[in-house]
Amino acid sequence: MTPTRLTRRRFLASAGAALAAPYVLPARARGAAAPSNRVHVGCIGVGNQGSQVLQGFLQNDDVQVVAVCDVNTASYGYKTASQYLGRDPARRMVEDHYAAGSPSGRFRGCDAVTDFREVLGRPDVDAVTIVVPDHWHAVMTVLAARAGKDIYCEKPLSLTVEDGRAMVQAVRRSGIVLQTGSHERSRQVTRLACELVRNGRIGRLRRILAVVGPHNKVGPEGAWAPMPVPPGFDYETWLGPAPWEPYHKDRCLYTFRFILDYSGGQVTNYGAHSLDMAQWGHGTDRTGPVEVEDAGSEWPRDGLFNVATRVGFRARYADGVELECLTRDDNVAARFEGTEGWVEVGYKGFFTEPESLKRTVFGPNEVRLYESRDHYRNFLDCVKSRAEPAAPVEVGHRSVTLCHIGNIAMRLGRRLRWDPEAERFIGDDEANRLLGRPKRAPWGL
Ligand SMILES: NC(=O)c1ccc[n+]([C@@H]2O[C@H](COP(=O)([O-])OP(=O)(O)OC[C@H]3O[C@@H](n4cnc5c(N)ncnc54)[C@H](O)[C@@H]3O)[C@@H](O)[C@H]2O)c1
C-alpha cells in the first residue's frame, strides 16, 4: 500500500500496530470496543443475503454500521418482509440494535441512501459490504477499492472472467482487504475434508464431484408481459451496467439468479461454494483446469429465465484429476475420490470412507489449511491486521472462473481447452468472446 492511499483510520491502525497495538487487538479481547476503535461499515445491498450479512456484522461490537444503501426502499416483491428488508427497514434494524445498547435507549445515526457512491465518498467509512446481484459486483468492487475501502463482497465474485480479473487487479493496486462471501472457507469440517485430501489420506486423488442444487424457481415461460415498476424501487439503478430490459418482478429480487444478464444460474450460485471447496481440497484454488466440456446440461427453450435447468459439465486438471459438476438435490457438496478412500462434505454433512478418517490427527509436518471460524470476524480481524483473509480476491476469482468456464462449455456444448495462466480458451474465439460483456454507460470499468 502506498502512503498516499492510507486513509486516516488506516493510518491510525498501522501507527497503533507499530506503537502500542491498541487498535489491532480483537474487540473480543477488550470487551466492548470504544467508538474510535470501531470499524465503520457501509452496507450496500440489504435484501435476502444482505440482511443476514448486516446482522452478522452487527454481532461484532467493534463494528459501527454508519450507512445502508439499497435501490429498494422497503421489501417490495419479497414474501417475508422482515427477512428480506430493503433500505428503510435495514436502517431501522441498525438503529434499534444500537439503541438497545445505549443508556438512553435511543439511537439515530445510520444513513440510508440509494446511490452507493455516497457511501464510497464518506471518509469515515473503512469497509463496505457488497451484497447486490452479481452484475454489480465488479463495478462496485473496483470503485470501492479505488476509494480505499476494504470489501466484504458476496460470492459469486464476478459475472464474467474478465470482470473477476479486473477486481483482482483493483484490489491489488489499492492494497485493500477483500473477503469473498465463501462461507465454507470458515467451516471447520470443510477445512478438515480438504486437509484429508491434501495429506493423501484418501490415497492419490482421482476424481472430484461438485454438486449444485436444482433450478428451484419457476419463472414466466414463453411470452411474458412487462410490468409497471413499483414505487420505491429504482429499477434503472438496479439494472446499472446490465442491458436495458423492461421491468418484470421476476427479473429482480432474488430470482435475478436465473437470468444470464445478471448471474449464471445455480452453477455460479451454488457452484461458487462447491467448486470452491473442490479447488481448495485439490490445491488448485489459485489456478484452474486445462479442459472443460458439457456433460448433459439442459437449457430452457424460452421464457424470462434462461440459465441451465440442469447443470452438467466435466473438467480435467493438468495432473489428470477429473472434476464433474452436476445438479443434485443437496445444493452444495464436494466429494473427493482417491485410490484408498473418499471424503464428502456439504450441506448434508461430512462423510468419509474409511469412517475412521473423521478422527484423523495431523502430524506437525502435514499440510494445514487457513483456519477461520467465523467469516465476518475473520474479515474484521484482517481489516485491522492487514493480513490476507480466508477467502481472498484471487481465490474468489478462481473459484467463480471455474463456474463461468463450465457455464460457457455447457452453453456451447463442446469440449474447450483452457489456459489457466492466460485465462483464455485455446483456439476458440467464440468461447473467448463469452469471457467478458459490455457494460451499459456510464458503468464501464
Ligand atoms: N454466501 C452465501 O451463501 C449467499 C447466500 C445468498 C446470496 N448470496 C449472494 O448475495 C448477492 C445478493 O443476493 P440476494 O439473494 O441477497 O439478492 P436480493 O435480490 O435479495 O438482494 C439484492 C439487494 O441488492 C439491491 N440492489 C440491487 N442493485 C443495487 C444497487 N445498484 N445499489 C444498491 N442496492 C442494490 C436490491 O434492491 C436488493 O435489495 C448475490 O451475489 C448472491 O449470490 C450469497
Image: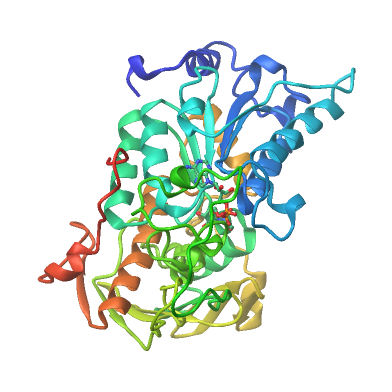
Q: Residue 367's x, y, as percent? A: 47, 58
Q: Which residue is found at the position 89% from the left and 23% from the top?
A: 105
The colour scheme used here is: rainbow
The C terminus is located in which quarter?
A: top left
134 vs 433, left or right, is right
Number of numbered callouts drawn: 0
Q: Nearer the viewer, residue 321 or 361?
A: 321
394 vs 249, left or right, is left
Residue 410 quadrant? bottom left
In the displayed structure, 58 sits above or below 198; it is above
Residue 329 quadrant? bottom right
Q: Which residue is found at the position 55% from the left and 73% from the top?
A: 333
Q: Residue 40's x, y, as percent? A: 60, 25
Q: Nearer the viewer, residue 24 or 219?
A: 219
The N terminus is located in which quarter?
A: top left
In the displayed structure, 310 sits above or below 168; it is below
Does residue 88 show up?
yes
Q: Which residue is found at the position 16% from the left and 70% from the top?
A: 430
Q: Residue furthest bottom?
A: 296
In the displayed structure, 182 sits above or below 68; it is below
Q: Nearer the viewer, residue 396 or 22?
A: 396
Does residue 277 show up?
no
Q: Residue 322's x, y, as percent? A: 35, 80
Q: Residue furthest left?
A: 427
Q: Nearer the viewer, residue 91 or 161?
A: 91
Q: Residue 416's x, y, as percent? A: 21, 76
